[in-house]
Image: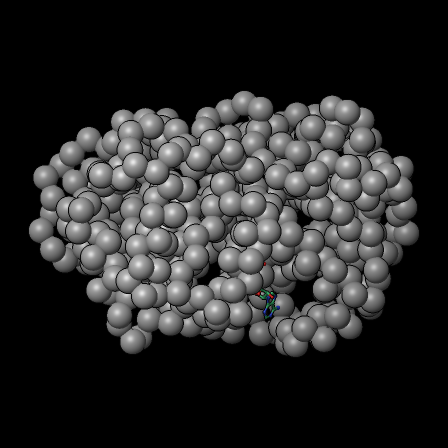
Amino acid sequence: MPSGVHESCHLTQFTDLGLAEPLLRSIKDEGYTDPTPIQAAVIPKVLEGRDLMGIAQTGTGKTAAFVLPVLSRIKELEITPKRAGCTALILAPTRELAAQIADSIRIYGRYMKPAVAVVVGGVKHNPQIRQMAPGVDVLVATPGRLLDHMGTGTIRLDGTSVIVLDEGDQMLDLGFMPAIRQVMNALPKKRQTMLFSATMPDQIRSLARDFLVNPAEVAVAAVSKPIDRIQQRVIHLPHSEKKAMLSKLMADPDIDRTIVFTRTKRGADRVSEGLVKAGFGAAAIHGNKSQNQRERALRDFKEGRTTILVATDIAARGIDIDDVSHVFNFELPNIPEAYVHRIGRTARAGRSGVAISFCDGTERQYLKDIEKLTNLTIEAEGTPQPFEKPPAPGANRNRGGSRPQVKANNQSKPTGGRRQDESGKPRRPRRRKRPAPAQ
Ligand code: AMP
């Protein structure tokens, strides 16, 4: 937790919040002394049964902020799920985040033993159907696969009384908005709805307007503002020099655990291969990897067997890895909000962090967009490259590279909506309208 923020809420204690006793016990087991600001603000509201709009990034303790009161209500109200149904539904953008939320539910619910199911793409349907058949207390799902099950009648939502939409802006960026709206329309009218998002683009605002009733609003960090403790730098250089520069910087002994971001899956593979060739322990994680490969890469990274994780935005979303000392943007993201998410992987839990971005000629506009969004001028080195148009959709950035295009995409995908770069077809998204700055 950022220490300054944490201190501001030292008067609230977990025992003041009204949580069921078994949850207080597991919180104690976890060693949490005080609720984080978002927990102190959100938990009482959710326990009252209110709808909630939460503006918060990962790393603020927001998972516990919704998991704890949801479990508490299930326990106190003694709600039992319907067959093939769930009492509470949590929607998350990626498989990794869904698995992580389910882990948190099991940890916090240690003394309650709630029935939990995870329904995500990229794995078989049948085990999920079997798991869901008797009904579960909490279902954590990605929107695409959930819709598949709803379509075949293997999951029903008519008995669901709580819905949490986590990382709303990321689900929007992944094109999940039509799927989310379909899910919301299938839920009973009488229910509790929570929406969490790190930023508030227009479509998230309108989702809140359409589906939340008189929501309590909680914001814990300035919207879209990178954490002040992160030292940010940008290095201007031609694309062809990025690999060598990355290897050079990686030799810095201050670098401990690092995430290197690329815009595309193929880019992640190439950068990871280059680092391994240069003698570094690196692994790539993205949507073309099997679930097992992703889990192994994450485990190796978390347990320190590899010190460099090369990731696309989608794969890295919401992953809670502590002690990341440096974030590298091998390629700048074309969606400026993604920059904020990426660099937020470092400087967790009160530590400081370093974010170094590479910027070639095609990325100058992306850098401008980021500086506009964050209202910062990022300290720059090197010679700014002449402005170039970003690569055309599907263009191969790997000058001289000839690896075949990988077709499979295990990322659970919505049926409609805009594609991300990571789907293999880079496409500059429509710019979101931003309100004009106050005069
Ligand atoms: P989240 O924002 O949900 O990704 O949580 C970030 C990290 O904070 C996780 O590793 C949690 O285990 C940890 N955490 C959550 N609540 C607390 C708390 N009250 N005190 C200390 N750490 C916490």
Q: Nearer the viewer, residue 307 or 136?
A: 307
Residue 182 location in percent, x, y?
Answer: 66, 25
Q: Is residue 51 visible?
A: no
Image x and y of residue 260, in percent:
36, 55
Give the quadrant of residue 13: bottom right
Q: Quadrant of the C terminus?
A: top left
- Residue 126 position within the rendered picture, expressed as x and y whole percent measured from the top left: 77, 37
Which of the 4 image quadrants contains residue 120? top right
Name the residue rendered at 66%, 40% in the picture. 123
- If the picture is divided into quarters, which one holds ligand 1? bottom right
Q: Is residue 201 left or right of residue 383?
A: right
Applied colour scheme: one colour
Residue 31 to residue 319: above or below: below
Indicate left or right for 198 with 142 as reference: left
**303 w.r.t. 283: above or below:** below
From where the camera sits, is residue 278 visible?
A: yes
Q: Residue at x 29, y 45 (%)?
A: 332
- The residue at 89%/42% (across/down) is 134
Residue 264 at x, y = what percent?
38, 40
Left or right: residue 209 versus residue 4 is: right
